[in-house]
Amino acid sequence: MPRTSFASLTAQAQQQQLTDAVDQFELPKSLVTKIAKSALPDNAKLQKDTVSAMVKSSTVFINYLGQNTFFSPVAVR
């Protein structure tokens, strides 16, 4: 994805571009739901907002891990 200059955009437009970029890398809702349900009792139910929040947070977390792994120095023995 080519880098975009944010200098000429308003703050709201910048935020929208960044949100769109993160949405492209979202994990599948079915996978996140399946993992979450496996950690809960059988009679527990997940609300729609809960699943949405878990999808967003897991996507951000995995992207954070990937970025830090990419930019961190590797210890060689």
Image (cartoon, rainbow, N blue to C red):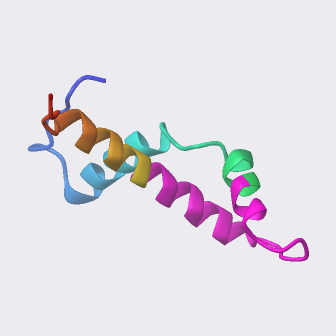
Q: Residue at x 84, y 76 (%)?
A: 44
Along the viewing direction, whichever of 32 and 69 lies nearer the viewer: 69
Left or right? Give the position of 26 relative to 8: right
35 to the left or right of 54 = right
Q: Position of residue 21 (x, y in %)?
A: 39, 40
Foreground pick, 16 / 8: 16
- Give the image location of residue 15, x and y in percent: 30, 55
Looking at the picture, tell me which residue is in the foreground, 8 or 25. 25
Quadrant (top left, top right, bottom left, bottom right) of the C terminus: top left
Q: Where's the N terminus, which quadrant?
A: top left
Task: List x then y, in percent, for residue 46.
Answer: 76, 71
As drawn, 53 above or below 59:
below
Q: Residue at x 67, y 63 (%)?
A: 51
Residue segment shown in magenta: 35-60
Which residue is located at x 34 percent, y 46 percent?
A: 65
> Which residue corresponds to the image point at 8% horizontal and 44% vertical from the top-left?
7
> Within the image, what quadrant is residue 33 found in?
bottom right
Percent of width and height locating residue 10: 19, 54
Q: Residue placed farthest to the left in the image? A: 7
The overriding secondary structure of the stretch rendered in magenta is: helix
